[in-house]
Image (cartoon, rainbow, N blue to C red):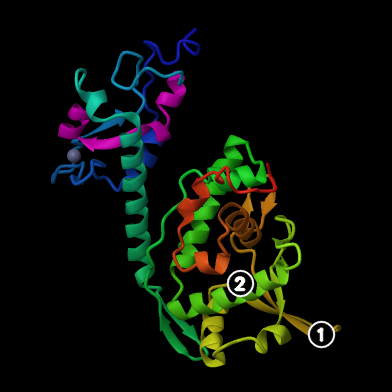
């Protein structure tokens, strides 16, 4: 009965494991915009509070929802706050009006992304120098927007399993974290390689692009073809050194056939039960849904575009 009543009067305690994870994700700070108060006192005591986005119970602020009691106590529905803001958010008379669902959800997402990014940047700083054949390249962390739901990209793959989706979004943000570390020179080289790949995929006559199967490896580009089309080979090679160092591109040589390819390494295979090639899935989605070529997208690294369902006006092949 508790399950059907959508929370009802059956407030569940928050699991220790959930609580621990929530604290890591929020960096131990209040998630309220412009607050950020540390949630432990100087002597180490806990002075924070856990607020429910969808209310813990039906008659709590934002509580009117079909969500089950379990879902209400799950990490995605919880947001860490200082005592003052916890009270404001959960005030019986004004909590819901001042802090509607969407506002709290956005607040949580933004705060947790900011924390992850800051921690990653701090840790990466020590490893930011990449030794390449042409010398050390200093790579700071570039700004990049995270994917929260990947809804649009998932639709293009017809992926629906909840656990697969969670893993998929993690992998996608892993790809973002890798690309964020590249220097401008490496991004330029990557962009040139992706551009050449796109030209190969394009059918000018029918104005379509065939990127291949998302479960395939690659993309692969014959070294010989690339050589003749590179604009500044010194810069290109500098970027290539870094891409190889970062394990993003490798030169794969086939001695028997006497050929060599630039191969995009499947370092961020998006895998649930199945395997999805990051480059192929992303390029296909961006091109079909938004007419955006992946080499242009890479300059901004906006992974949140994958959260958006393709506009109705785009004639995507997956609908
Ligand atoms: Zn606060």
Q: In the displayed orientation, state which residue is furthest to the right.
A: 256
Question: Alpha carbon of mark 1 to alpha carbon of mark 2: how far?
Answer: 25 Å
Residue position marked by numbered label 1 in the rendering: 255
Q: How crowded is mark 1: few (under 14 residues within 10 Å), some or many (20 or more)?
A: few
**Where is residue 176 drawn, in percent x and y?**
48, 60
Residue at the (28%, 20%) spot, across then down: 61
Magenta: main secondary structure? helix
Label 2 residue SS: helix
**Where is residue 96 drawn, in percent x and y?**
26, 24
In the image, residue 155 sits, relative to residue 286, either above or below, namely: above
Left or right: where does residue 295 sit relative to residue 113?
A: right
Q: Judge by depth and name the residue closer to the eye, 312 or 186.
A: 312
Q: Residue 194 carries which label?
A: 2
**Where is residue 24 drawn, in percent x and y?**
35, 46
Residue 128 in sight from this viewpoint: yes
Left or right: where does residue 198 sit relative to residue 94?
A: right
Left or right: where does residue 177 sit relative to residue 233?
A: left
Does residue 199 show up magenta in the picture? Answer: no
Q: Which of marks 1 and 2 is in front?
A: 2
Split into quadrants, the picture shows ligand 1 in the one at: top left
The quadrant where residue 193 appears: bottom right
What are the residue bounds of the magenta stretch? 68-89
Q: Is mark 2 within 8 Å of ligand 1?
A: no
**Where is residue 169 drawn, in percent x and y?**
53, 48
Q: In the displayed orientation, state which residue is furthest to the top.
A: 1
Q: Residues within 10 Å of mark 2 (few under 14, many from 20)?
A: many
Q: Quadrant of the C terminus?
A: top right
Residue at the (49%, 52%) spot, across then down: 305
The quadrant where residue 81 appears: top left
Tell me whether circle 1 and circle 2 mark residues in contact (CB < 8 Å): no
Does residue 82 show up magenta in the picture? Answer: yes
In the image, residue 87 sits, relative to residue 106, either above or below, namely: above
């Amino acid at each position: 009965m508790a399950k059907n009543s959508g929370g009802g009067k059956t407030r569940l305690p928050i699991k220790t494991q959930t609580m621990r994870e929530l604290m890591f994700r929020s960096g131990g700070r209040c998630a309220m915009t412009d607050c950020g108060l540390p949630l432990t006192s100087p002597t180490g005591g806990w002075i924070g509070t856990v607020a429910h986005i969808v209310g813990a119970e039906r008659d709590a602020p934002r509580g009117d929802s079909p969500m089950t009691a379990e879902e209400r106590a799950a990490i995605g529905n919880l947001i860490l706050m200082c005592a003052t803001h916890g009270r404001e958010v959960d005030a019986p008379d004004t909590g819901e009006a001042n802090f509607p669902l969407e506002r709290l959800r956005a607040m949580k997402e933004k705060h947790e992304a900011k924390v992850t990014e800051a921690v990653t940047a701090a840790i990466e700083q020590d490893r930011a120098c990449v030794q390449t054949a042409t010398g050390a390249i200093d790579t700071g962390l570039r700004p990049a927007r995270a994917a929260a739901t990947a809804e649009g990209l998932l639709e293009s793959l017809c992926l629906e399993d909840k656990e697969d989706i969670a893993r998929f979004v993690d992998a996608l943000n892993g790809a973002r974290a890798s690309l964020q570390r590249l220097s401008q020179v490496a991004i330029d080289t990557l962009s040139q390689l992706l551009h050449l790949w796109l030209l190969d995929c394009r059918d000018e006559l029918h104005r379509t692009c065939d990127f291949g199967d998302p479960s395939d490896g690659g993309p692969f580009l014959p070294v010989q073809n690339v050589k003749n089309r590179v604009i500044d080979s010194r810069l290109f090679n500098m970027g290539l050194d870094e891409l190889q160092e970062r394990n993003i591109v490798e030169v794969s040589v086939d001695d028997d056939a006497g050929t060599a390819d630039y191969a995009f390494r499947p370092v961020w295979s998006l895998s649930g039960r199945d395997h999805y090639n990051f480059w192929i899935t992303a390029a296909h989605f961006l091109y079909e849904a938004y007419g955006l070529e992946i080499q242009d997208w890479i300059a901004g690294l906006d992974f949140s575009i994958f959260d958006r369902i393709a506009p109705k006006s785009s004639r995507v092949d997956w609908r």
